[in-house]
């Protein structure tokens, strides 16, 4: 199945949105929240290039509204804005709560990733090698190891204890 859009089309849609409405679709922090179903208004606007398909536009809008700058803007703003930049409708508390939860989830994921990478990163410490004599202690094995060639596995058999005298 062929993709419905490719990254070049989405990038062209993002550039067209930021060039046409820079007050809404610029990069950065604290972006203005856009009205719900703004894609319908955008699709009706004249002058849309042929390289910007409907599906590429939808993907570009999806990437915009899930960006950190937009989510910060949703948390801090009180109103949604239309294409002219005018405040049109109030933001619902549920949308603000969703934005906060999404930002927290991303923050926790970033912290866990940085901790994991710090754990995996080994710090090179100089080691001092000295000449030591090794003493080898001979111990009786706790188990007897046998190897069966037919099954190619190692069997561990416990040692049979010596018979004890019953008192």
Image: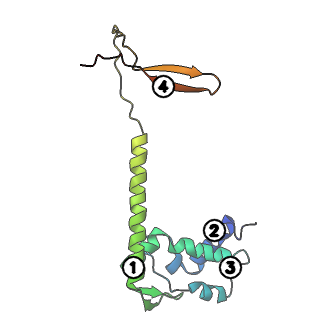
Is residue 34 rendered to the left or right of residue 126? Answer: right
Question: Exactly how many numbered labels are in the figure?
Answer: 4
- Please tell me which residue lies in front, 24 or 112: 112
Residue picked out by circle 1: 96
Residue 89 position within the rendered picture, expressed as x and y whole percent measured from the top left: 44, 91
Residue picked out by circle 4: 156
Task: State which tag comes first along the sequence, 2 or 4.
Answer: 2
Measure the alpha-carbon separation of dots 2 and 3: 13 Å
Measure the alpha-carbon separation of dots 1 and 4: 61 Å
Q: Which of marks 3 and 4 is in front?
A: 4
Q: Nearer the viewer, mark 2 or mark 4?
A: 4
Residue picked out by circle 3: 54
Residue 109 position within the rendered picture, expressed as x and y whole percent measured from the top left: 42, 58
Residue 11: numbered disc? 2
Q: From what the image shows, is residue 156 above or below residue 111? A: above
Is residue 97 rendered to the left or right of residue 151? Answer: left
Q: Nearer the viewer, mark 2 or mark 3?
A: 3
Measure the alpha-carbon separation of dots 1 and 2: 28 Å
The way the protein has been coloured in the rendering is: rainbow
Quarter the N terminus occupies = bottom right
């Amino acid at each position: 199945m062929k993709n419905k859009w490719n990254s070049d089309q989405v990038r062209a849609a993002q550039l067209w949105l930021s060039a046409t409405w820079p007050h809404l679709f610029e990069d950065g922090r604290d972006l203005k929240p856009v009205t719900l179903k703004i894609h319908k208004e955008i699709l009706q606007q004249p002058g849309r290039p042929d390289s910007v398909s409907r599906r590429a536009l939808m993907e570009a809008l999806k990437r915009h509204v899930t960006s950190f700058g937009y989510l910060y803007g949703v948390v801090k703003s009180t109103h949604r804005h239309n294409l002219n930049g005018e405040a049109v409708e109030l933001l619902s508390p549920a949308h603000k709560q969703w934005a906060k939860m999404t930002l927290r989830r991303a923050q926790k994921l970033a912290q866990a990733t940085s901790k994991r990478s710090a754990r995996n990163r080994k710090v090179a410490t100089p080691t001092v090698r000295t000449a030591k004599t090794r003493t080898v202690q001979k111990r009786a094995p706790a188990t007897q190891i046998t190897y069966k060639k037919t099954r190619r596995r190692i069997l561990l058999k416990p040692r049979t204890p010596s018979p004890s005298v019953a008192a």
